[in-house]
Amino acid sequence: MNSLSYAILGILSRKQQSGYELGKHLEYIWAAKLSQIYPLLAKLEEKEYVTSFRVEQTGKPDKINYQITDLGIETLKSWLRKKPNKPVTRDEFLTKVFSLWLTDLDNAIMLLTERENDFSVKLEKIKNDLVTLEHENGADMYNPSSIFFSRLILLKRRMRLCQDEVEWCQWVLQLLSKVQKPV
């Protein structure tokens, strides 16, 4: 099984949900598209790590919810005891920054400004999610035995990463602002 499969099991260990809802919950720990999630759910169901059932909805199509099984929980627990793989960094933006010397100043500024804006928007969303988490769960989210604790620490990590990215972009933009444009 791949890491995304374990991420899906981890999310389902908290509560049953649809593939679409899984996609929303995955956004803080794994970049995955629904086109990746649904085939993995089918494989997980085939291996009996999850089960699915139809949920009737009024005024819209029925949805399929997924629920982790006891075998899925045991598989997840076993995986948690193993050493994780080294992180992989694949970021097209960083590849472009590596070759920044080949572009003009205006394009470089645009590239960094867009990145700063994107991460500023992400940062605000994370801050709002943290406020909601605290409002809904209070002190329970600081209890390491609570299912909300991992959400708290992952949101805080993501917030710091976004803050660092915004500050780094601002630093590079400041360096670029000192460059003289050719006349």
Image (spheres, rainbow, N blue to C red):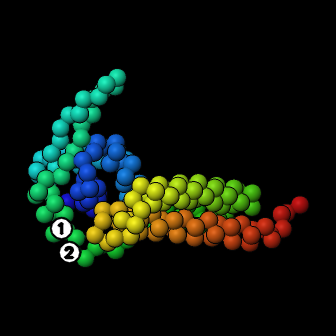
Q: Quadrant of residue 42?
A: top left
Q: Position of residue 150 (x, y in %)?
A: 35, 66
Residue 111 in sight in this render: no
Label 1 residue SS: helix
Answer left or right for 10 relative to 135: left
The residue to which callout 1 is attached is 77
Give the amino acid at mark 1.
Answer: Lys
Q: Nearer the viewer, residue 24 or 32?
A: 24
Q: Quadrant of the N terminus?
A: bottom left
Amino acid residing under circle 2: Arg
Q: Is residue 37 above or below residue 61?
A: below
Image coordinates of residue 3 in percent, x first then y, are 27, 62
What's the residue at 40%, 66% (across, down)? 139
Q: CA distance from mark 1 to mark 2?
A: 7 Å
- Does residue 19 appear to the left or right of 141 in the view shown? left
Mark 1 residue crowding within 10 angstroms, few (<14) / some (14–19) / many (20+): few
Q: Residue at x 64, y 69 (%)?
A: 167
**Residue 105 as seen in the image, left or right of residue 17:** right
Which residue is the site of mark 2?
81
Q: Label 2's element?
A: loop
Q: Would you say the residues marked 1 and 2 are in contact, meaning their CB atoms lie under 8 Å apart? A: yes
| Residue closer to the observer: 45 or 70 | 70
Q: Quarter of the image for the C terminus: give it.
A: bottom right
Image-quadrant location for residue 134: bottom left
Q: Residue shown at 10%/50% (left/top)?
A: 48
Query: Residue 124, how many percent across, how many down?
Result: 57, 56
